[in-house]
Amino acid sequence: MLLLVGLAVPGVTGIAFVYLVYDERGRSDFWNRVRNPRRVGLRWLVVILLVPFGVGVLAGVVDLLLGGPGPSWGEGVTQFGVNPLAILPALFFATLPPILEELGWRGYALDRLQLKVSALSASLILGVVWALWHLPLFFIEGSFQHDAVGFATTGFWLVMTGIVVLSVAFTWIYNNTERSILGIIVLHGWVNFTAEVIVVPDPAYYGLWFVLAGVIVAIWGRKTLTAAPEVPHPPAPANP
């Protein structure tokens, strides 16, 4: 129950601020971004599906070439034949957390940040907040972060900085899909699912995300992370 409450905070807070800050146009725009798949388009849907899978596979190959164990199937896959319910944790992390988080992170906070700073700066600021939001999990027994990673370990720093870098890739997708919250929910869920199914050592996995973020900034530019000269913004309030 505490986990669900914590997961719900970004989304509930984001929706609350949407109704406090925006007028009817802004609120309608918010819900359209949640449910309208046309904002994503086929091209960017393919990008959303290929990028996390490609990063996982390529990171596994890189790790193998560098003498590491390489990629392996997650517990949900290896145990599925014996216990089909073993896949439930992967399905959980691919569905509910992305929905509850992204209604706030990209659904509200990113837009407000991009009104003041560049897309890259907004990504990094939000990424730091997003990473710190995960920090309590490292002190809760029974969580993956506490039991498998640990606080202030090398894995801890890889995870925390990796979340910040992921934020850059998320903004890139968000700004190129007409600010689609639905697209970001799918992306977030697919990142979680592929990471649960294809297990890769953290240095190679997060290292590839760092490389991808660098390529995105180099090609699309730090100002918008798109080919457009300006970042997309929420609709302006209607004139009284």
Image (spheres, rainbow, N blue to C red):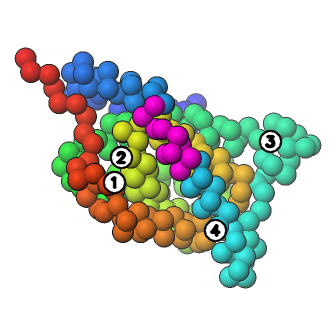
Q: Residue at x 62, y 41 (%)?
A: 93
Q: Nearer the viewer, mark 1 or mark 3?
A: 1
Q: Residue at x 32, y 26 (%)?
A: 29
The residues tagged by marks 3 and 4 sit, at their Cα atoms, a distance apart of 24 Å
Identify the residue under disc 3. Answer: 86
Is 36 positioned to the left or the right of 51 in the image?
left
Which residues are the magenta region? Answer: 38-47
Identify the residue under disc 1. Answer: 226
Q: Is residue 34 above or below residue 203?
A: above
The residues tagged by marks 4 and 1 sit, at their Cα atoms, a distance apart of 25 Å
Type of amino acid at the residue the image marks with label 3: Ala
Is 44 positioned to the left or the right of 140 in the image?
left
Identify the residue under disc 2. Answer: 175
Of callouts 4 and 2, which one flags the residue occurring earlier in the amino acid sequence? 4
Query: Are the two marked residues, 3 and 2, in contact with CB atoms closer than 8 angstroms?
Result: no
State the image coordinates of residue 147 (x, y, percent, origin top left): 66, 57
Q: Which residue is drawn at 54% across and 70% down?
A: 207
Identify the residue under disc 4. Answer: 59
Q: Residue 47 carries which label?
A: none
The residues tagged by marks 3 and 2 sit, at their Cα atoms, a distance apart of 36 Å
CA neighbours of label 4 inside 10 A, class few (<14), some (14 to 19), many (20+): many
Type of amino acid at the residue the image marks with label 2: Asn
Of callouts 3 and 2, which one flags the residue occurring earlier in the amino acid sequence? 3
The residues tagged by marks 2 and 1 sit, at their Cα atoms, a distance apart of 7 Å
Query: Are the two marked residues, 4 and 1, in contact with CB atoms closer than 8 angstroms?
Result: no
Type of amino acid at the residue the image marks with label 4: Ala
State the image coordinates of residue 172 (x, y, percent, origin top left): 40, 52
Which quadrant: the N terminus? top right
Q: Which residue is drawn at 22% across and 50% down?
A: 230
Query: Are the two marked residues, 2 and 1, in contact with CB atoms closer than 8 angstroms?
Result: yes
